[in-house]
Image: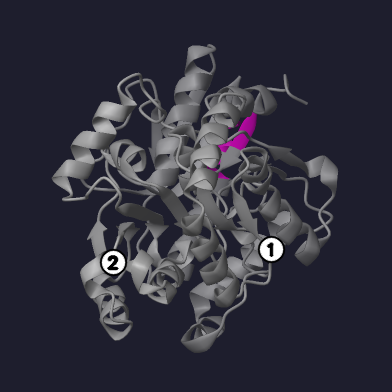
Amino acid sequence: MKIALACFKYSSAAAYPQDLIRLAEELHRRGHQVSLYCRVIASGSSVPAFLTVRHLKGASWGNARRAAKFIRGLREALRQDRPDVLVAFNRIPGADFYYATTRCIAATPLSGFSWFKKLLPRYRFNLALEKRIFRAKSGTRILHVSDLQKKEYQRAYGTGDDRFFKLPPDIPARCGRPADASLRRARLREELGLREDDILLLTVGNFRIAGADRAVGALASLPDKFQERCQLIVAGSGSVSAMRRLARHLAVADRVRFTAVDEELNDLLLAGDLLLHPARGEAAGTAPLQALCAGLPVLATSSGGWAREIVRADSVLLPAPFHQVELNRTLRMLLSTPQKLEEMAREAVSAAGSFDLKRRFEVAADIITGKGR
């Protein structure tokens, strides 16, 4: 088959183009001819040699106009090249498949100062593209990664069940609980200056989406007897300065540290005692699953995805709507019963062994080529 993959900007360092590459590799391994159509290739990005690239350039003012111009150029290129299947990694109407890793725009509330986004051309344009993809008369099938996404899209557009195809999560091969987990845990905790009875809390992901501010608030709510033993490491991206201001305001600045998410994340998970994931809404983030695979218990909100897996692992899932008081109370309860955390850690390892975590791109390739439909 001739299979076309399309995205606005290709960057081998960014998340969804990495998914694009891995899907392309799986399709190529099966003998299919794979092409990439994109508007921008980021400087320094590597493109697999087997991938035929159609670089559809075109200058224009504003993101919305550039995207619209690319979609028109893509339509013309496809008429010439006549691929069998088009898989879009951005909101591109008319694609056979949309690889959906983001939440539904129409169902995502805009609060506080973010309400003004509705006035921006880019927001209105992306919303219009989303409507064209998910409306009833569209033939685009949806490759989605969480039940939360599907519910949001169906609530907004009434899209039929038959158009959704759920992909399993994809966890990096380096994640999990290795044979020397105890040694690695002890080594990193020593490097972090933690005593044996200290408690290491972790929050991983985009600060706002993963609810890092909520985690800091929960830490600040703890009684002194727990707070003086706790450290919170926030690993991810966002405004560190804003988070530091919040920690200072709540008088826990000396208990909070920040780091980037890198290849050492699994060691950090091994060193931790509890993952706090009070997410505001996350479609594809796999931090809770990575934690469970490492044997780290999870305290999460249901809006963060992977609810079924978290419950199966006997970790704690807070129902919607979110209440900070409930998060604070639950954290205090868990820290008051260390034997419960130990039980949750054992259950996490046991349950994670039954999760389907390594076949996302095999399943996607089956669906795209007709084997999974």
Query: What SS does tag 2 mark?
Result: loop
Q: Distance between the Cα atoms at labels 2 and 1?
A: 29 Å
Part of the protein shown in magenta: 76-86
Residue drawn 35% across the image and 63% down it = 59
Where does the image place residue 290, in percent across and percent down from the top left? 46, 39
Structure colour scheme: one colour
Residue flagged by tag 2: what amino acid is it? Glu
Residue drawn 52% across the image and 56% down it = 334
Give whichever of 345, 93 is nearer the camera: 345
Residue drawn 78% across the image and 52% down it = 138
Where does the image place residue 136, in percent across and percent down from the top left? 84, 56
Q: Residues within 10 Å of mark 1 (few under 14, many from 20)?
A: few
- In the rendered image, the quadrant that contains the N terminus is top right
Whether residue 90 appears in this view of the structure is no
Give whichever of 296, 283 is nearer the camera: 296
Whether residue 224 appears in this view of the structure is yes
Residue flagged by tag 1: what amino acid is it? Pro
Q: Earlier in the sequence, mark 2 or mark 1?
A: 2
Where does the image place residue 333, in percent across and percent down from the top left? 54, 61
Q: Is residue 87 above or below residue 316?
A: above
Q: Is residue 77 magenta?
A: yes
Q: Residues within 10 Å of mark 2 (few under 14, many from 20)?
A: some
Give whichever of 200, 106 is nearer the camera: 200
Q: Which residue is mark 2?
A: 228
Residue drawn 55% across the image and 46% down it = 340
Q: Which residue is mark 1?
A: 319
Residue 10's image quarter? top left
- In the rendered image, the quadrant that contains the C terminus is top right
